[in-house]
Image (cartoon, rainbow, N blue to C red):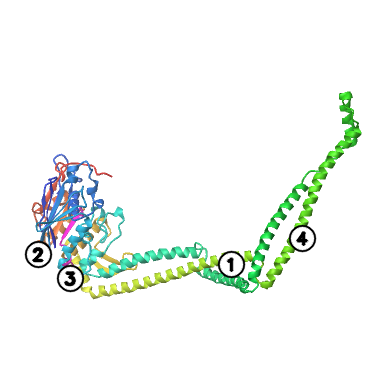
Amino acid sequence: MIKINRLYSEPQIFEPISFEYGINIIMGEEAESTNKKIGVGKSICIEFINFCLLKRIPDSRLNLIPKKYSDITESQIKLDVDFNDKKITISRSIKNQEEIFIFVNGEEKIFNRLDDASDYLGTLYFELFPANLKRLSFRNLLQPIIRDERSEFKDLIQSHDTKKRIPSDCGPHLFYLNLGLEKYSEIKTLNDELQKRKVYFTEIKKLVTQNNELKIQDAKAHLNELESEVLKVNKSIEGLKNNESFELLQEDLVRLENKLSELRIRQQAIKYEIKQIDSLPKPENINENEISIIFNQFKQGLGDLVEKSLDDLKEFKNKIDGFRSSIVNDRLTALKKELNQLNEVVRKLDNDYSQKISLIDKGEVLRDLKTSIKIFNDKNSELSNLRSLIERYDTAERDKKLLEAEKTVLISDFDEELYQKAKIIKSFRETILEIHEKIMGNREAHFDIKTTKNKSVVEFVMRTDDDGSHSTERMKVFIYDISLMLNEYTKQYHPGFLIHDNIFEDDDSIEKSLNFLYGYNEKSPNEFQYIVTLNSDLIELASQNGKLSFNVSDVKRASFTKENRFLGLKYNETK
């Protein structure tokens, strides 16, 4: 059992607070200048307790204290606790958060890592339990005991800030109940692995089915067709390689293919040039009469300078046209002649190639050696890819099914353990009903634990009278948390203390809840410690009307106002 004795600091930045067994109230009260009770430091006080119990600073509101308040961030925050049979003091500072000092019966131990300190306290806690008991980390153990105020107390299992979306963890709850923790841990681990396999399986399926455009059966059918095609081409090529003449003809075939490729390129070039020549405009046929008129006009204007006759001009034009036609016609003739020669050469080479191929191939598959080999390589590559993907798909599907089958067996084992330990669940349910009757006035409530196939693995089902409203959900969490601390079975594993930061919302639930706890402590003293923060106005009316069975001042451990804040100053939290 763990009992919190005293919270203080060195150098002192707040008044020390001592705690006792039973109820411990940290009160927010009115000041003379204002009746506001929010922001006086109640929650920060709880955060300091949580900080000393090794809460990580990034998860704490203490991380939002401005660094300029160095007297706060550098002070050693200390917590004195009874830890089973040991007197322990835990000391940390916000500035050096990973450095933890733990004094055990006066002997100092220094840790430079938070995890190491957590492991140490966890080892101390589990000293009194059997060695084969499934264990939790120290912080995990405290998860349901110090719920984050920002969890809004609306879920039995989820105890973290709702904005952080931290997955629910039933581990500590099952530990307190001594129910199926080992199976739960195995299934959680299996779930994580199964999720990875499912993601992998989905990705492979997309590749095989071309982003789900095909069915798996169609992809496998295509694989069979590819195998047939590759087999045919490969058989023919292997037939070539096994033929005695293949080695003798291979170089000739490659040479002929290269030569044919060059000639065909030249054929295309010649054809293109002929086409260009054919598209040239023809020489213009000018009428002789028109030439005569133009010539005489120039001759009159130029006089004796022009001595040439019209016949000379005509002769000159004919020479120019003849020269042009000669060049074009000669080039065209030469190109056509070369093309004819190329065609003849290509035809002969084609015949030669066909003859050589026919010597080693019956003409069933191969028409062109290079093309055939390229087709084979492409098809074979596609075949290898698809075969590999389908093999990976089949393996992923098998692995997924094996894990799902293993999970089914584990869930079945978990169900069997729940059945074998039904008396624990029945006892815990009875504790819930008793507390529900004391507070709500009836036994119209229910509690059960069931396995589930989803990620949570197990479901804690609790119903209360008129549940569903915000305040009723908070009361449901209160009854559940108190039951974990007080039930005859769960209290054997529970640390024995519980902290609720602003869980109450109306004075009626506070009155009956605190009366129940006070009465329980009177009958069975020193069995539990309950620390709660609340504002005075929620309890004043019940106190004035005599509905409380105790004097509030007897259980009030600290009181804060706007004029007397926990840290003695007002500050704005950093973002």
Crowd rating for badge 1 (residues with CA inside 10 Å; few <14, some 14–19, many 20+):
some
Q: Amino acid at mark 4?
A: Glu
Is residue 493 part of the magenta span, yes or no?
yes
Q: Amino acid at mark 1?
A: Phe
Give the percent coordinates (x, y) of residue 473: 25, 58
Position of the C terminus by quadrant: top left
Give the percent coordinates (x, y) of residue 16: 11, 49
Q: Mark 4 vs mark 3: which is more N-terminal?
A: 3
Crowd rating for badge 4 (residues with CA inside 10 Å; few <14, some 14–19, many 20+):
few
Q: CA distance from mark 2 to mark 4?
A: 117 Å
Local secondary structure at mark 3 = loop
Image side of residue 338 versus residue 522, left or right: right
Q: CA distance from mark 4 to mark 1?
A: 32 Å
Q: Are marks 4 and 3 in contact (CB under 8 Å)?
A: no
In front: mark 2 or mark 4? 4
* Rendered image: mark on residue 28: none
Residue range (magenta): 489-504
Q: Mark 2 vs mark 3: which is more N-terminal?
A: 3
Q: Mark 2 vs mark 4: which is more N-terminal?
A: 4
Q: CA distance from mark 2 to mark 3?
A: 26 Å
Crowd rating for badge 2 (residues with CA inside 10 Å; few <14, some 14–19, many 20+):
few
What residue appears at the point 24 percent right and 48 percent down from the top-left corner?
A: 63
Q: CA distance from mark 2 to mark 1?
A: 87 Å
Residue that badge 4 annotates: 344
Residue that badge 1 annotates: 376
Image side of residue 414 versus residue 569, left or right: right
Residue that badge 3 annotates: 130
* Rendered image: mark on residue 524: 2
Q: CA distance from mark 4 to mark 3?
A: 99 Å
